[in-house]
Amino acid sequence: MTSISANLQAVSERIRDAARAAGRDPAAVRLLAVSKTWPAQSVREAAAAGQRAFGENYVQEALAKLAEVDDPALEWHFIGPLQSNKTRAVAQHFAWVHSIDRLKLAERLSAQRDVHLPPLNVCLQVNVSGEDSKSGVAPDEVLPLARGVAALPRLVLRGLMCIPEPTDDVTLQRRRFATLRGLRDTLAAEGIVLDTLSMGMSHDLEAAVAEGATLVRVGTAIFGARPRSESAAVAGG
Ligand SMILES: *Cc1c(COP(=O)(O)O)cnc(C)c1O
């Protein structure tokens, strides 16, 4: 067994244990393997171990890797900050985008999504940590943004995503994830029913699962510590 497959198994066990502790069905939590900065070979190893969904943050890096991996069975999620001038490539090559924080981005992705592809699945990235985090729509702007995105023809609004400030304080972790869950419930009361809460990473997935995550985005615990400092990018820079 390679270390990647052993790590995948260990992460699946963490998810299972956290789900059971919360009285949830472990099958209700998907694992997204975040392969940013890691080569195509690492993706292939994870795929050989049964992993299907992969997350990438940087458009150029991702396009090269997708082409090299060239496996139609894999599902690619774009989870990084997205600039308007990069939307076309993302609309063409990804199945999901988790980082929608303004209507203009969503409008461009919808207009650029190829008619022969299924609609693009999207999540709204919400800034649940206030001024500690730069990326994401403010909680009180989620409802109008959700209404606008839900109306776009080539997108399917699936859920909400957050990247709280890094902390070892489990109470604070849970409070941030509970904020995202509460926003999902608020939208549901307004008639916008979403099936995805994209929250939790290597260090806080237990807290996220306890608060209702349906998809956890895990890099380090699967592939190892990234070679260069990622803290700024993870915080949303
Ligand atoms: C890098 C990244 C992750 C994975 O973080 P780890 O701490 O390595 O598990 C998850 N989500 C986003 C948006 C990221 O940029």
Image (tube, grey):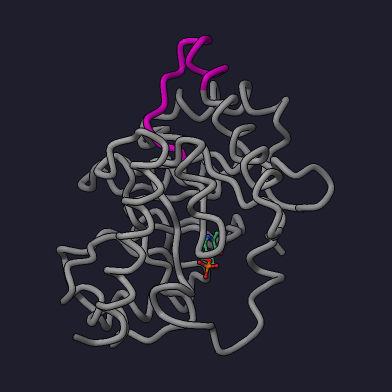
Which region is colored magenta? 185-197
236 vs 35, left or right, is: right
Q: Quadrant of the N terminus?
A: bottom left
Q: Residue at x 40, y 79 (%)?
A: 223
Q: Is residue 110 rendered magenta in the image?
A: no
Q: Residue at x 60, y 28 (%)?
A: 145
Q: Residue at x 29, y 39 (%)?
A: 28
Q: Residue furthest front?
A: 21
Question: Which quarter of the picture shows residue 84?
Answer: bottom right
232 vs 17, left or right, is: right
Coordinates of residue 12 in the picture (x, y in percent) = 30, 60
Q: Residue at x 44, y 29 (%)?
A: 152
* Tally of numbered tags: 0
- Nearest the eye: 93 or 50: 50
Question: Which quarter of the picture shows residue 73?
Answer: bottom left
64 vs 232, left or right, is: left
- Please say if 228 is above or below 195: below
